[in-house]
Image (spheres, helix red, strand yellow):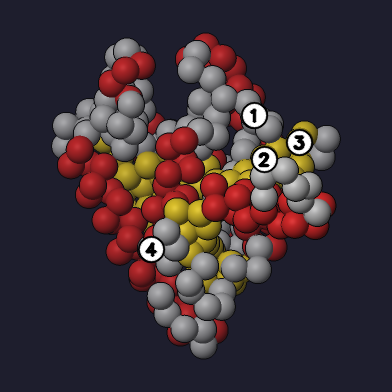
Amino acid sequence: MIGKQLPFAGLMFILVVLATARQTEGKVVMRTIAYSDGEVQLEGYFAWDDTIAGKRPGVLIVHAWWGLGEDEKARARQLAELGYAAFALDMYGAGKFTDDPAQAGQWAGAFYQDRQLGRTRAAAGLKVLAEQPEADAGRTAAIGYCFGGTIVLELAYSGADLRGVVSFHGNPLPAMEGDADRTRARLLVCHGAADTLVPAETINAFTKSLEGSKVDWQLITYSGAKHSFTTRSADRVAIPGVGYHTDADRRSWQHMRVFFEEIFRQAATESGAPTR
């Protein structure tokens, strides 16, 4: 091809092939999806296994307070490898990510101050997941890390059409009046026993708010685990009470898998869809 001008159509074909190759790792395929919540422009990350025929259960991923980063994208790929269609949403705005705790706290704080805003923003991401042709909108779940763990519980409280949500070392805000009656999802809260950022009083308020309700919830506590126990880079942030914990990371992921098998098996039985 040296010395020849490649036809435009041929050049475009090569560019498309190269772009696709860069976004493919083994069986897992990824794509970036731009979307919005009102005037806020957002950008999420979708992953699925393209060797699986038909629709498969969808899992929404909500990032920690730093913003959508590589940790959540890696989790999306892990979930795709397990046979799910995974969408890592964006709570802050396209490209907004920080390593500065003060900035992260400011961004996340807006959603703690306005809980409805968090529910609405997360619902925008859930809508994107439900619209993907690879995902079964009738069989969806949501998982979240730290700030994201709080948000997935808020999404469940809103009455979103979810089979279940999993909070990893989140700050589980108690259900407000009417939330328990609206909640359709089953809840799994994975908490570190040594998490001083989310004290026992907060956990107690969360469980008390659901007492006597119809909500199906579980709380699993891991001994010795601090806040951010699933984040491998947690020890580098030098925040007291924050740290990675190998056993809690592994065990909580397995607990999530068992939880998903249960909720999606029931969903498949109800709908007649094949199980995964």
Q: Is residue 149 visible?
A: no
Q: Are marks 2 and 3 in contact (CB under 8 Å)?
A: yes
Name the residue at 28% across, 48% down: 252
Kindly identify which numbered label has been placed on residue 188: none
At label 1, counting other C-alpha atoms closer than 10 Å, the crowd grade (few under 14, some 14-19, many 20 or more) is some
Q: Amino acid at mark 3?
A: Gln
Residue wearing tag 3 = 41
Q: Earlier in the sequence, mark 3 or mark 4?
A: 3
The Cα–Cα distance between marks 3 and 4, rounded to whole angstroms, is: 30 Å
Q: Amino acid at mark 2?
A: Glu
Q: Earlier in the sequence, mark 4 or mark 2?
A: 2
- Foreground residue among 162 and 137: 137
Q: Is residue 207 left or right of residue 226?
A: right
Q: Amino acid at mark 4?
A: Leu
Residue wearing tag 4 = 82
Name the residue at 54% across, 53% down: 21
Kindly identify which numbered label has been placed on residue 95: 1
Q: Position of residue 79 (x, y in %)?
A: 42, 56
Q: Position of residue 112 (x, y in %)?
A: 58, 28
At label 3, counting other C-alpha atoms closer than 10 Å, the crowd grade (few under 14, some 14-19, many 20 or more) is some
Residue wearing tag 2 = 43
- Foreground residue among 75 and 12: 12
Q: Amino acid at mark 1?
A: Gly
- Foreground residue among 1 and 37: 1
The Cα–Cα distance between marks 4 and 2, rounded to whole angstroms, is: 24 Å
